[in-house]
Image (spheres, helix red, strand yellow):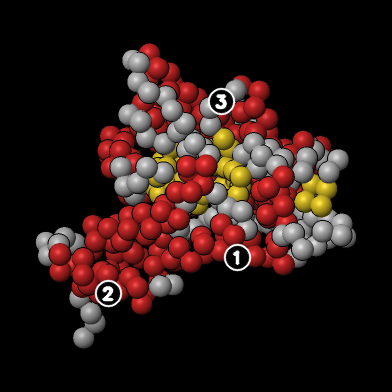
């Protein structure tokens, strides 16, 4: 088994770059911040993802750029309110990041080099509105991929958006059941295109599982129920779901890839290396993985999570089985899963905070 460790005599090679260059595992950056993305490309990144929280953070961290731009946009569109102006900035941020990824897009024939922009979370109850915005966003740049929530409503929107030629990603997604339902919706959309003779080029579709947010939720359940679980076991729940979903995608031949997001430990990268999937760490996690010379096992995806961990989590926390089993939930239950409710609220809050930021530009405090 080929492994690079910090004692391998190859310390000059960064772990992220080594894994990116020697395995089918694709590294994407979990931010559209152009400054971070440029550095991440240096580590081997060939794509980037974004969400309302990440977009808000990127804008807040570069107000010297975005405040005057917001002032310009407000002058150009005098009748528009804070929400529409804020989303204009999000789209501009995304287009700038997408331009940095064009070389990877061309080199991979469209499989990578993608910038993932998320639909407005305030539309999460309206499939038609999600589809319309997905189509709009897909036209911002050739290498845009659009995030739609993995809820019953979102899955209907995903199938229709794929049918209309949109490259998609799933968000608000934490479980094997969600990942499989999204992949099946993508297949239906692609099959509908084929049945009508529409072009089925490389769409680069991916299906996110937010492994760290699953871990967060199960830890919250354990704390609420006053459960004492063996130390470290709850850090493996998301990894277990990601590995199982990857195996199912491979067995069923889905034309989309699993994407690992929402990092809480390096396991969400190191345990998945070797798989034909996407791993999207925040930039600071990438820096820390490189700084700490985390060992790289090029076949780690094939190593199952310890069965004692799986059985303990099954026995103690029913929500783990709901997340781990392919039939653990129906699509109608996806939005009520604890991690989904918590994440949707965070995304909606980020939208509100972006509105407030724009408001401070439009109507400065006296």
Q: Please tell me whether mark 1 sits on a helix, a strand or a loop.
A: helix
Q: Is residue 142 left or right of residue 103?
A: left
Label drawn at residue 296: none
**Residue drawn 79% across the image and 47% down it:** 297
> Quarter holding the N terminus?
top right
Q: Mark 1 packing: few (<14 Cα in 10 Å), some, or many (20+)?
A: few
Give the residue at x 53% y 39%. 108
Q: Residue at image x 61%, y 28%?
A: 249
The answer to whether 188 is drawn above or below residue 364 in the figure is above
Marks 1 and 3, the one that precedes in the sequence:
3
Can you give x and y, in whole percent of width and height, for residue 356 in the image?
30, 68
The residue sitting at the top extreme is 195
On residue 284, the disc is 1
Residue matched to label 2: 68
Q: Which residue lies furthest to the left in this view?
A: 79
Residue at point 48%, 49% (across, down) = 103
Left or right of residue 197: residue 172: right
Q: Residues within 10 Å of mark 2 (few under 14, many from 20)?
A: few
Q: Which of 310 and 185 is in front in this view?
A: 185
Q: Which is nearer the N-term, disc 2 or disc 1?
A: 2
Residue 240, can we see it?
A: no
* Residue 16 percent across, percent down from the top left: 68, 55
The residues tagged by marks 2 and 3 sit, at their Cα atoms, a distance apart of 45 Å
Where is residue 361? Give x, y as percent.
25, 74
2 or 3: tag closer to the N-terminus: 2
Above or below, 256 against 89 in this view is above
Identify the residue under disc 3: 254
How far apart marks 2 and 1 lie (CA) works out to: 27 Å
């Amino acid at each position: 088994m080929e492994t690079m460790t910090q004692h391998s005599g190859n310390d000059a090679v960064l772990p992220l770059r080594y894994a990116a260059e020697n395995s089918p595992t694709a590294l994407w950056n979990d931010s559209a911040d152009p400054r971070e993305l440029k550095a991440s490309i240096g580590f081997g990144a060939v794509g980037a993802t974004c969400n309302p929280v990440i977009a808000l953070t990127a804008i807040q961290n570069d107000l010297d750029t975005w405040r005057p731009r917001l002032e310009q946009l407000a002058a150009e569109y005098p009748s528009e309110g804070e929400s529409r102006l804020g989303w204009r900035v999000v789209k501009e941020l995304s287009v700038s990041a997408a331009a940095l990824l064009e070389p990877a897009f061309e080199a991979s024939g469209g499989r990578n080099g993608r910038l993932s922009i998320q639909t407005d979370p305030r539309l999460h109850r309206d499939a038609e509105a999600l589809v319309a915005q997905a189509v709009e966003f897909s036209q911002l740049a050739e290498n845009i991929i659009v995030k739609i929530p993995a809820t019953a409503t979102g899955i209907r929107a995903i199938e229709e958006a794929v049918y209309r030629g949109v490259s998609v990603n799933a968000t608000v997604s934490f479980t094997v059941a969600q990942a499989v339902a999204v992949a099946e919706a993508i297949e239906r959309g692609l099959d509908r295109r084929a049945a009508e003779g529409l072009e089925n080029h490389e769409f680069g579709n991916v299906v996110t599982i937010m492994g760290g947010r699953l871990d967060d939720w199960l830890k919250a359940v354990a704390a609420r129920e006053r459960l004492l679980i063996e130390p470290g076991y709850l850090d493996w729940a998301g990894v277990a779901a990601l590995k199982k979903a990857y195996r199912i995608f491979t067995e069923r031949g889905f034309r989309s890839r699993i994407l690992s997001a929402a990092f809480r430990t390096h396991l969400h990268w190191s345990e998945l290396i070797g798989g034909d999937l996407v791993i999207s760490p925040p930039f600071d996690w990438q820096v820390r993985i490189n700084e700490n010379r985390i060992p790289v096992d090029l076949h780690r995806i094939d190593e199952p999570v310890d069965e004692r961990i799986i059985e303990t989590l099954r026995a103690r926390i029913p929500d783990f089985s709901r997340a781990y089993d392919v039939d653990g939930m129906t699509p109608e239950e996806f939005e009520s899963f604890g991690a989904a409710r918590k994440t949707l609220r965070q995304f909606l809050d980020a939208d509100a905070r972006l509105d407030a930021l724009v408001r401070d530009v439009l109507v400065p405090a006296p």
